[in-house]
Each structure stands twice: as structure tokens, then as C-alpha cells.
Image (cartoon, grey):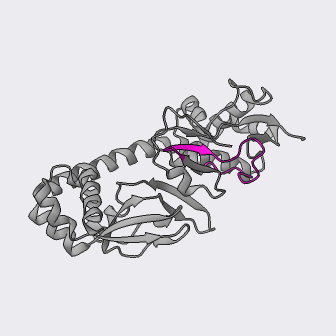
Amino acid sequence: MPTVDVGKCNGCGLCVSVCPGSVLVLVDSVATLVEREDCWRCTRWCTLCEAVCPTGAVTCPFEVVFGEE
Amino acid sequence: MIPSVMAVETEFLQGLPYFSDVNLPELDSIKRLFFEKTFDRGERILIEGEASDILYFVSSGVVKLFKTSADGKEQILKLVRPGEPVNDVSVFDGGPSPVNAEAMGPVVLYGVREPDVEAVLRDHPQVARSVNRVLAGQVRDLVALVEDLSFRRVTGRVARILLEHAGKGAGEGHRLTQQDIAAMVGSVREVVGRALKALEEEGAIRLERHRVVINDRESLRRLVDAD
């Protein structure tokens, strides 16, 4: 779910330390997703990585859809 | 080994707003009063209502400050990042901690006991001035947050944004972040996050990994109209 703006990432690693699903790691001091679209570990709405990022580099964009009503 | 540990600590102290006007020889004497404490993910650091006699700063990791309501709901008040104090308010006024503090991942704290804090303030008056400045800044931030906490209205505005963006697809221009919504409704990310959780609890929406699913269009429309 998270995306990383490499230009804003300062390599602080806070996102890595709080992620409950181990989806993020630091590679060469840049936050990187371990797996992408088919990732099974980031399985629910969490957004902790986005919340702790001090530079706004990590964001969790989402689409809005109508469900079955 | 030991010299490099001490070098890291001085650098860390230099970066703290409290010690911005303290020269290196003075920092060396202050540094000796600090000790390190580590916590694992989920470990409780402070309990709401209990006295704090150790002033903690975050060295690495993130600490969550939160209150728990009578019905067990958790409300996060602040995320404390490296370089920030965890519990300055209750150490300085001697009162009980107004919040719980918990490690969000592995956390390393630097602590200094309250009597030693008194000694530092007494022996290094520039620290007392810096502390005043930091506390004043906190008051300023809280005033801004209070202004923003007309919660019901934010929920209605968030509901409107969700209805406006529903069904537009997942293309670049149509995905939103909580920060985007905050900017659109004139609020902050944290309040938008709480509004989304509240909407989910009411059953109006469902929060999934990549998307927000609107389950009850009518319920959202009622919230928009009530704004």
C-alpha cells in the first residue's frame, strides 16, 4: 500500500521500525517496499508508515469506490 | 568502543532544542546524567495518571502518546520522533502523566532523573530559557489543534470528498492520501484519519488496503448535509 517519494526520503528508517507487516526496508538509506502489488503482508488499512514519516516521503494513496449496497 | 558511544550521545544532545545554546564542555558534564533505556514494539513506557520522575527523550524509533476512553477506545495525541521529549510536561509540573506512552516499534530512549533535571536548569540558565521556548511552541501547536477539533464538521467535509471521488478509478489523478483530504477540507492528517475510522465504525465505509469502499451512500450524504 505505501509509496515512497525517493526525492523526499531522508533515510531515517522510522517507517521501517513501525511497520507491523515488515513491508518496508532501507536500501542504501532509502525506504523501499519489499513486495508490491501482490504483497500479502500489508493486508489491511494501517497507514502507520505515512503517519510517522517526517518528510512526507511515504504516503498511502487509495481510491474511493462504491460497494454493493 | 566506549569513546564512540559517548560521541554519539554528545551529538544527540547537541541536536535537542533544550541544549541548543549549551557549549561542548557544558554538554559533556550534562551528558553524564543521561542513561539509555530500550523498549520493544508495544511495550508500555508511561501509564496515564502515574507520576513521571524521569525525563525521556527519543533517541531512535517512535513513541505513541495516547489516551484511552472509558469504553476502551484509543485516541492518539502525538507521535514522538527521535530528538523529541516524551514526557516533559509532567516532569516539569510534577503532576501525573496526562497520557499513556507506548513504543510503536523498537525504541531507544535517553533518560535523566528529575533531581538531575533541576540541577541542569539551575547550573545552565540557557537551558531553562530553551525549555521555555519549547513549551511555548507546544502550547501554540495545541491551540491550533483545538481550533481544528470541531470534529463533526470535519467528518461531514471528509464524507463530501469521499462521495466526490467515488468511482473515479485508481489512476494517478484519482488516488487520494489522507494528507490530500486534509488539505482539501482545511484540517490535518490525524483528524482526517480519525474521521475515516469513525465513518468505518458507523458502517458508512470500509477501509481496505488500497481503497475506501462506500457501503452506505445515504449515510454519507446525511453527514454532508448536516455540515
Identify the residue at horizontal 16%, vertical 63% (top origin). B28
Identify the residue at horizontal 70%, vertical 49% (top origin). A45
Location of residue B168 in the rendering, given as x and y in whole percent from the top left corner = 78, 26
Location of residue B147 in the rendering, given as x and y in whole percent from the top left corner = 45, 41
Identify the residue at horizontal 75%, vertical 35% (top origin). A64
Residue B194 vertical placement versus B217 (above, below): below
Q: Closest to the observer: B95 or B225?
A: B95
User: What secondary structure predominates along the stretch shown in magenta?
Assistant: loop
Magenta segment boundaries in residue numbering: A27-47
Q: Closest to the observer: B121 or B105?
A: B105
Picture mark count: 0
Classify the position of the N terminus of chain B by image quarter.
Answer: bottom left
**Res. B141 image quadrant:** top left
Magenta-drawn stretch contains A32: yes
Seen as rendered, the residue at the extreme top is B173
Location of residue B97 in the rendering, given as x and y in whole percent from the top left corner = 39, 69
Identify the residue at horizontal 34%, vertical 50% (top origin). B138
